[in-house]
Amino acid sequence: MKKIFNPEYKNNRKKYFSDISDDKWNDWQWQIDNRITEANQLKNFFQNIDVEAINKVSERFSFSVTPYFLSLINNDTPLNDPVGKQIIPDIREFKYDSRLILDPFKEENERSPIRGVVQRYPDRIILVTTNFCPAKCRYCTRKWNWDKCQVLTLPMLENVVAYLKKHPEIREVILTGGEPFLLNLDFLDSVLSAISSVESIEVIRIGSRILSFLPQRITDDVISILSKYSPIWIVTHFNHPNEFTPDTEKAVKKILSAGCALCNQSVLLKEVNDSVDVMKELVHALQNILIKPYYIFHPDLIEGTSHFRGSINDGIQIMKGLRGYTGGICVPYYVVDLPEGGKIPLLPEYILKEDEKGFLFSNYEGKEIFYSR
Ligand code: SF4
């Protein structure tokens, strides 16, 4: 069956990392140890980069990328590439916009009832487990924690369990980060065990970009831990069809074998995925490897992201181009996450008129159809 994989991945890997054996390449620790974190190192891979600009921007917000994710960049100028744009510092991050701040959701303080926990809704909490990610998204909502180094510790975990016991209305815990799959595995096991031991918890969610940045991390050891704590939902983060490779599919199959469900959230990013064609290919790539497209987020109001921001109308046009033109399983919700109000789904207008007789609908092709009450 047809799969949508980055066509250049193998060539890029050969071009940039010809001396690296398969064993090393597939070793997640090697990938972590060999992350590219400086502009000078990037020079070894790409001709057309502005070392000075990258250095300047990364003094404000550092950068990091795994060799694997770097091999998904198909363009000699990484800032012209939809994968490269997501992780290479861009001088436009300095463009001032008074709406954009470091922590618009006030996760660090106001929305944090106890250290490590963010609560925005009554029945679920976010548990910030680490600030470490194998690569760094330039539009990251948790930039506030990049330098703060808030990481979960055992005493903090005990407080979290006590908090959950005091609040039986909480039924779901969402592990997030940074990257939860880069926690020490014994600790990850302890976290999942402690949370599952609370009687009122029904389900655990893990928000992770590991399948995009480092699918090699999904080892048999990870799978045997996940298998113990079903039901777990893994919320992946893919933004572009070029982020899929046979390595991604292998990791997804393993996760499915652990009895986990998968869904994906993307961020709508200008010049990365802001077109119907790219989004359609993205949701098809997800469906083909059994990940349900769940959300497309309008970009959060994060400092340094003005160049990624399009209009809400752009997103609505994309939704118009998806709904009806591809199967409903492939159609995510497009949402804007209001710092003071939660997620708002944004839909094209399908009801044109309503009166006592019925509704005038516009179908996906724009055809007007009356439907009586
Ligand atoms: S993977 Fe998530 S937490 Fe990590 S840098 Fe990207 S957006 Fe931030």
Image: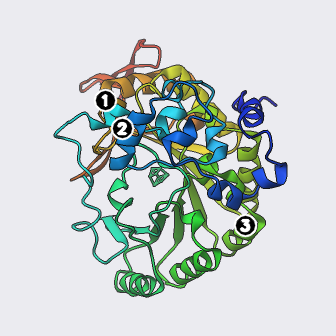
* Labels 3, 1: front one: 3
Q: Earlier in the sequence, mark 1 or mark 2?
A: 2
- Residue 298 — which label? 2
- Residue 312 — which label? 1
Residue sitting nearer the eye, 65 or 373: 65
Could you tell whether 124 is left or right of 104 in the image?
right
Q: CA distance from mark 3 to mark 1?
A: 39 Å
Could you tell whether 270 is left or right of 25 in the image?
left
Name the kind of residue labelled 2 in the image.
His
Residue that label 3 marks: 223
Work out whether 49 lies above or below 148.
Answer: above
Question: How dense is the environment of label 1, judged by Cα within 10 Å: few (below 14), some, or many (20 and up)?
Answer: some
Name the kind of residue labelled 1 in the image.
Ile
Question: How dense is the environment of label 3, judged by Cα within 10 Å: few (below 14), some, or many (20 and up)?
Answer: some
| Residue at 49% over, 40% down | 39
CB contact under 8 Å: marks 1 and 2? yes
Work out whether 74 lies above or below 246.
Answer: above
> Of helix, strand and loop, which one carries label 2?
loop
> Of helix, strand and loop, which one carries label 3?
helix
Any part of residue 309 in sight: no
Work out whether 103 lies above or below 100.
Answer: below
* Residue 353 % position (x, y): 27, 21
Q: Earlier in the sequence, mark 3 or mark 1?
A: 3
Name the kind of residue labelled 3 in the image.
Ile
| Residue at 53% over, 29% down | 78
Ligand 1 within 8 angstroms of badge 3 C-beta? no
Q: Earlier in the sequence, mark 3 or mark 2?
A: 3
* Residue 23 % position (x, y): 83, 54
Ligand 1 within 8 angstroms of badge 2 C-beta? no
| Outermost residue to the top | 367
Q: Quadrant of the N terminus?
A: top right
CB contact under 8 Å: marks 3 and 1? no
